[in-house]
Image (tube, grey):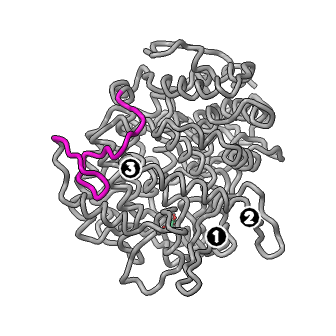
Amino acid sequence: MDGVQGMGMRKVGSQSSLVEPEDYDLSRLLDKPRLKIERKRSFDERSLSELSIGGNLRGVDSYENMHSPAGGPRSGFNTPGSSCRNSFEPHPIIGDAWQALRDSLVYFRGQPVGTIAAVDHQSEELLNYDQVFVRDFVPSGLAFLMNGEPEIVKNFLLKTLHLQGWEKTIDRFELGAGVMPASFKVLHNPIKKTDTLIADFGESAIGRVAPVDSGFWWIILLRAYTKSTGDTSLADSPECQKGMHLILALCLSEGFDTFPTLLCADGCSMIDRRMGIYGYPIEIQALFFMALRSALPMLSHDGEGKEFIEKIVKRLHALSYHMRSYFWIDFQQLNDIYRYKTEEYSHTAVNKFNVIPDSIPDWVFDFMPCRGGYFIGNVSPARMDFRWFCLGNCVAILSSLATPEQSMAIMDLIEERWEELVGEMPLKICYPAIDNHEWRIVTGCDPKNTRWSYHNGGSWPVLLWLLTAACIKTGRPQIARRAIELGESRFAKDGWPEYYDGKLGRYVGKQARKFQTWSISGYLVAKMMLEDPSHIGMVSLEEDRAMKPLLKRSSSSTF
Ligand code: GLC
């Protein structure tokens, strides 16, 4: 395949870097077995190399250069866990937000091990919002790391690792060993004075959905912990190495795939209900990519670890090529698809997936600005889901799945389509909403996912931290500031809702929980990153040169 050859080519280009190019070449990892002690250095080198600036990314260097391992509470905000203040004038809601975050802590035998999804005393129906969700804990964990409180993150990582080791069955079916729980709960017995854990791997979840994202978030958080504390001993421990191996074994196993993307059932991620994301959803592909890249410097180079490193390197090459080529859309690309011929056979086909131009929805022609682009929701045979999904696009920027040019284009799109994507209350989970017949077919008449509500075009405060991180990485913090200001005008007043409804995100969501923890921690993380952009290093990976350059897919393609 032409792409495979292209991926072998290396172009250093105009990168300004603090390290020699070879320090940052994935392909070299393959033939460089290192001793354990050297691998530790490799993580540091890599941390250093992540300080390097992509030629087209403004403002990252100074931010990342400032990053240093946490040495105690560092937030400039006067939080219950920190006393230091700096010249930065904190917003009045920050103190309360920290208090609410601390109120959500869950303890196991006296140790904090996570945060509960929502501390909503008004809501009669608890469902599973009284549990610690793996994905929901990520912004909480980042907030604690940024505030110099890594212990809770370590406890969480170890506790979930322990749960991974459980035997997991749904009815008579045994789940893969690497599956991480969607959520867990601590049961306190006040009489016996005992704490016990229960976990949900999908067997209790509404719709029995699979938490494919949990394992990826776990690896991403392990890297954030390691990067923030400088403590490699957790990631190096045999337990964590095994945990990573098990997760990787699940997603790197051979099958009948014809694409390097990961095939998923519906409801496999933050959108954990039927929403037509089955197939190859962008959220999972971006998290998959980021988890693979995050695992790479943490894996030990001996035995099984080395095999996984080899597999990862190969997969990353193929995955980045596939995603950057086939999921990317901009004005030019849309025009090309619009003019596609169909029924082409053999490898000379331009319309490789046999997409029928008539299936392009009307809205996308108006939505697509001349300036900007994004990764679409899904690509598979004859199926392109043109919807915009926020999380996948932000993670694509953070993981450098997006090229620097694509990252800039995503930010351009957010600016150009501010009203649609941010509106009055940040931030749309996806755009646009589906309605009527389509809603009936796609969601199965889901009354929670009616148009512009919840997962169907609802606006989720938690997404602010991802937007802010993407803004800082691309050197455009003013975009984040604008969105945060919108949130600050209402979040606390509205009781930190889980989501807002409406085309502009103006209404508190129909069934939204109040005091939703990740709305609170997402806001705090966004604020802390803006105040001290060096925090971005915990959740950002610089572009890898071995994955450059991209071959042009068609003569008119811009990338
Ligand atoms: C809802 C969300 C899911 C989240 C959970 C707990 O199910 O869709 O993403 O993890 O609530 O907050």
- Residue 244 within the magenta-colored segment of the rendering: no
Q: What element carries label 2?
A: loop
Residue at numbered disc 3: 465
Q: Where is residue 439 in the image (x, y as percent from the top left)?
A: 54, 70
Q: Where is residue 353 in the image (x, y as percent from the top left)?
A: 70, 42
Dot 3 crowding, Cα within 10 Å, few <14, some 14–19, many 20+: many
> How many angstroms separate mark 2 from mark 3 (CA)?
32 Å
Q: Is mark 1 within 8 Å of ligand 1?
A: no
Of the image marks 3 and 1, the number of the one nearer the N terminus = 1
Of the image marks 2 and 1, the number of the one nearer the N terminus = 2
Q: Is mark 1 on a helix, strand or loop?
A: strand
Q: Can residue 202 be seen in this view?
A: yes
Residue range corresponding to the magenta coloring: 66-87
Q: Which mark is residue 166?
A: 2
> In the displayed structure, would residue 343 be above or below residue 557?
below
- Residue in the picture at 69% in, 73% down: 203
Of the image marks 2 and 3, the number of the one nearer the N terminus = 2
- Residue in the picture at 79% in, 45% down: 253
